[in-house]
Amino acid sequence: MSFDPDYAAELFHALGPVRCRNMFGGTGVYAGELMFALEAGGVLYLKSDRSTDQFFEAEGCEAFSYETRDGRRTIMSYWRMPDRLFDDPDALAEFARRALAVARAAKDGKPKRKRPARRS
């Protein structure tokens, strides 16, 4: 089951147009080319980093994690969206803007991939 794109557009309308893309049993939510939210198992997570983790921790939320094939637990940089935000559009917009800013900073901080040299 995928995350409903119309519902995502309604939730994140403050960010402008968003799109959903199915991936690995979940759904990525994008603003432009930046993935700022993730739905997995019916739970919505927002992108976070050290500068925003504290907001999620203060809400009692947990980071998204999954178990690898070899049994290790991997923790991702997405945190469960606080339930109260579903009833508070202004607060949801603020969390979503922070998540988008984190996604943008992460993209800007990554080195650009070099294309392999063409062989003649």
Image (spheres, helix red, strand yellow):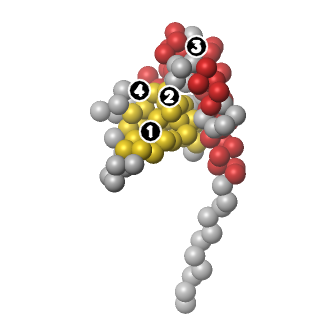
The residue identified by callout 2 is 62
Residue 37 shows up from this direction: no
Residue 108 placement (x, y as % from top left):
69, 50
Q: Secondary structure at mark 2?
A: loop
- For the residues labelled 2 and 4, say whether their Cβ atoms are less than 8 Å apart: no
Q: Which residue is mark 3?
A: 89
Outermost top residue: 87
**Which circle's residue, 2 or 4, is located before the other in the chain?**
4
The residue that label 4 is drawn on is 43
Q: For marks 4 and 1, give the CA distance.
A: 12 Å
Question: Which residue is the site of mark 1?
Answer: 65
Residue 113 seen in render:
yes
Q: Tag 4: Cα neighbours inside 10 Å, few (<14), some, or many (≥20)?
A: some
User: Which circle's residue, 2 or 3, is located before the other in the chain?
Assistant: 2
Q: Is residue 24 above or below residue 63?
A: below
Q: Crowdedness of circle 3 by 10 Å Cα count: few (<14), some, many (20+)?
A: some
Q: Is residue 84 left or right of residue 73?
A: right
Residue drawn at (57%, 45%) of the image: 33
